[in-house]
Amino acid sequence: MHDGRTAPRRYCGRECILNSLPQHECKCIRNPDMWERVAAALASPTPGIGIYGDDYPPIAKALGLPARSTLRDVFGDSWADILDAFGLVPPKRRWRSAAEKAQAPGADYEADLARMLERQELARVAEEHAALEYERRILEREKTAGYGFTVARVRDLPGVRVNGRECVAVMLR
């Protein structure tokens, strides 16, 4: 029996009864350790490709991972949504009925894989752009701060590196 006190969970932020908080946090899908274990279980031997949905339950049971129903609650009802959350595409279907073939005659596994790789590349480029933009904002903020100097101009110094990072020249007034 619990006394009704709750606290937010560390990884997912949902409210949890204090008595069960430690048990939840070690099994939470948002826990980085659990995330890595689930990601490894979902990945097939082929890079970027996931396993079949029917293959996951025995793996989850053997490794003490969250059930498929838990993954559906968090990431969506379809197995493709779950795999997509981990950056994977579904494997080729084992079989397709005539109705499925008629419904999706252009279903193309290679196209799905290409789309997934393109999404990953776009995410990587966006992340790099955000990091560069952050550094530029810091430089802009420093224009007016510090020692009464005003930054008149900032220019890149191609090929000049200090501690492995590219340098810029700053003209002060």
Image: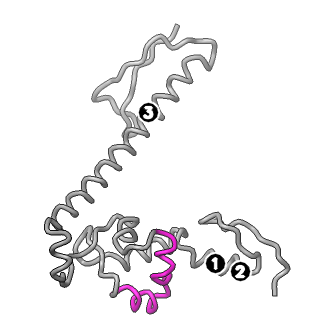
The image shows residue 32 at horizontal and vertical percentages of 51, 68
Relative to residue 27, is residue 122 drawn left or right? left
Left or right of 134 on screen, residue 43: left
Circle 1 sits on which residue? 24
Q: Secondary structure at mark 2?
A: helix
Q: Nearer the viewer, residue 159 or 122?
A: 122
Q: Is residue 12 left or right of residue 116?
A: right
Mark 3 — residue? 133
Disc number at residue 20? 2
Amino acid type, residue under disc 3 in the picture = Glu
Element carrying mark 3: helix
CA separation, marks 1 and 2? 6 Å
Quadrant of the rendered image containing residue 98: bottom left
Residue drawn at x 39%, y 45% is 127
Q: Are marks 1 and 2 in contact (CB under 8 Å)?
A: yes
- Residue 160 is situated, as x and y percent measured from the top left of the image, at 32, 29
The residue under label 1 is which amino acid type? His
Q: Which segment did they paint magenta? A: 55-75
What's the amino acid at mark 2? Ser
Task: Give the spatial CA distance, label 3 vs label 2.
Answer: 42 Å
Pick whichever of labels 3 and 2 is earlier in the sequence.
2
Counting from the top left corner in percent of width and height, residue 147 is at 63, 16
Residue 156's label in the rendered image is none
**Residue 17 belongs to magenta span:** no
Q: From the top left corner, tell me how far across and down residue 168 is, in percent.
A: 39, 24
- Marks 1 and 3, the one that precedes in the sequence: 1
Near mark 1 (Cα within 10 A), the count class, few <14, some 14-19 or many ≥20, is some
